[in-house]
Image (tube, grey):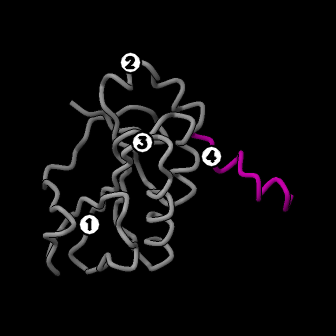
């Protein structure tokens, strides 16, 4: 079972429409699963696309952050979810690059409880660029 992390802490996953693998996606899909090695330019943003879930195969693999940022810059406004090996220390970066939520497994939630994730939920206040501007 998975747990969803948002700025308010752990929550149940309400998405019930499944995910289409990226390689099988057509123009009318509602959601897609995007591997970390996907070229962001290859993701078609359509009016029907409501959820993009980007894989993090390792906490040391930051390609998903780039994909998220590029999707937001391209105009994607739907739900953007990171899943896989994302750790609480990366939560602020995930939010800054455009993710709305992070999907983690129960074993990670047991090792990194909700308090550790919520501690990083003030990602807007602890932004290096904002501190330099202000």
In depth, the one of 134 and 23 nearer the eye is 23
Residue receiving disc 1: 50
Badge 1 or badge 4: first in the primary sequence: 1
Badge 2 or badge 4: first in the primary sequence: 2
Badge 2 or badge 3: first in the primary sequence: 3
Badge 3 or badge 1: first in the primary sequence: 1
Whether 35 is drawn above or below 105: the answer is: below
Mark 3, secondary structure of its residue: loop
Distance between the alpha carbons at the discs numbered 3 and 1 = 25 Å
- Horizontal side of 126 relative to 70 (left or right) equals right
Task: Say few, some or many: other residues with alpha carbon within 10 Å of mark 2 (under 14 / 14 to 19 / 20 or more).
Answer: few
**Which residue is rendered at x = 38% and y = 72% of the image?**
39
**Which residue is rendered at x = 34% and y = 51% of the image?**
55
Residue receiving disc 4: 123
Q: Which residues are magenta?
A: 121-134
Estimate the x, y position of residue 122 in percent, counting from the top left: 62, 41
Residue receiving disc 2: 110
What numbered label is drawn on residue 113? none
Distance between the alpha carbons at the discs numbered 2 and 3 = 18 Å
Distance between the alpha carbons at the discs numbered 2 and 1 = 30 Å
Residue receiving disc 3: 58
Whether 33 is drawn above or below 102: the answer is: below
Distance between the alpha carbons at the discs numbered 2 and 4 = 22 Å
Whether 71 is drawn above or below 12: the answer is: below
Mark whose residue sits in front, 2 or 1 = 2
Estimate the x, y position of residue 32 in percent, counting from the top left: 22, 63
Labelled pair 3, 4 in contact (Cβ < 8 Å): no
């Amino acid at each position: 079972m998975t747990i969803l992390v948002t700025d308010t802490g752990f929550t149940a996953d309400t998405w019930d429409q499944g995910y289409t693998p990226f390689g099988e996606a057509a123009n009318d899909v509602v959601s897609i699963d995007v591997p970390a090695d996907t070229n962001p330019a290859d993701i078609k943003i359509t009016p029907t696309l409501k959820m993009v879930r980007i894989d993090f195969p390792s906490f040391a693999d930051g390609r998903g952050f780039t994909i998220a940022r590029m999707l937001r810059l391209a105009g994607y406004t739907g739900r953007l979810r990171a899943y896989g090996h994302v750790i609480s220390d990366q939560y602020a970066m995930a939010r800054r690059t455009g993710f709305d939520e992070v999907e983690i497994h129960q074993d990670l939630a047991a090792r990194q409880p909700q308090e550790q994730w919520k501690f990083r939920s003030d990602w807007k206040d602890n932004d290096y660029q904002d501190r330099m501007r202000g």
